Amino acid sequence: TYQPVESVGEYDGKREVHGCQLLANGHILISEAGIPQLVEIDANGQVIKIISLPPTKQEVHLQIHMARVGPEGNYWVAYLGDGVIYAVNEDGKVINTIEVKTADANTQLAYEALPLNNGNVLVSGAGTGKVMEFNPSGELVWEISKDDLPGIDLQWIAGIDRLPNNNTIICDWGNGQSVVKALEITPNKEIVWQLTNPAFKGISRIQVIPVEYCSVATGEIY
């Protein structure tokens, strides 16, 4: 069990933890809002390190939701309300900044920033209804929106994933309004499958589990 830990500075307001990532060393990376920071803990819940993140004037729920460690070892963090993607090193130093822009100042802009093996970063655009891929210079190199998918009303994009075959998984939280809760698309924006089960109000994120960890016969996960 993880309980938010203290950090530098004074803050006695609400804290929120929305995201975590299992790291290659067996530790867990926790994304914490309120005091924007990343906390790495071991399997016993002991804090290994705390990484302070850039400040924001957004209220706690519009700060950070998920952070991901990239292949190069840097931490990529999306600031939901600010629409800013930061890459920071283990000392918390900002080494790259990418901005998500829109004409609507009230739109929530960036839920997750997923660093890719090609050096780019894939961003779920939250209220923009888009998924965007940026190169390290911040240039938009690929995107998809509801305009690219006739009959599918992408509303509020949350979790994303890029598969080994270069397809993309998109989760639509949709505030309970979206018909399609999740889908897989090809780089050419062709739909592979879509989930429309009304039992789901919306889906924040899907964890893709490699088939080698699963038993088709029993449905067990190892």
Image: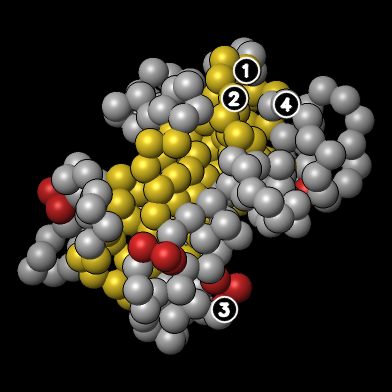
* Mark 1, residue position: 94
Looking at the rendered structure, the kind of residue marked 3 is Gly
Which secondary structure lies at badge 2? strand
Q: Position of residue 41 (x, y in %)?
A: 55, 31
Q: Earlier in the sequence, mark 4 or mark 3?
A: 4
Inspect this view and state whether residue 42 appears: no
Q: Earlier in the sequence, mark 4 or mark 1?
A: 4
Cα–Cα gap, marks 1 and 2: 7 Å
* Mark 2, residue position: 97
Which secondary structure lies at badge 4? loop
Cα–Cα gap, marks 2 and 4: 11 Å
Cα–Cα gap, marks 3 and 1: 35 Å
Is the residue under label 2 in contact with that under label 1 (CB below 8 Å)?
A: yes
Looking at the rendered structure, the kind of residue marked 1 is Val
Is the residue under label 3 in contact with that under label 4 (CB below 8 Å)?
A: no
Residue 181 location, quadrant = bottom left
Looking at the image, which is closer to me, 196 or 155?
155
Which secondary structure lies at badge 3? helix
Instruction: Name above or below for residue 43 compared with residue 220.
Output: above
Cα–Cα gap, marks 2 and 3: 32 Å
From the viewer's perspective, tell me whether residue 162 is left or right of residue 77: left
| Outermost bottom residue | 198
Mark linked to residue 54? 4
| Outermost left residue | 217
Mark linked to residue 176? 3
Q: Earlier in the sequence, mark 3 or mark 1?
A: 1
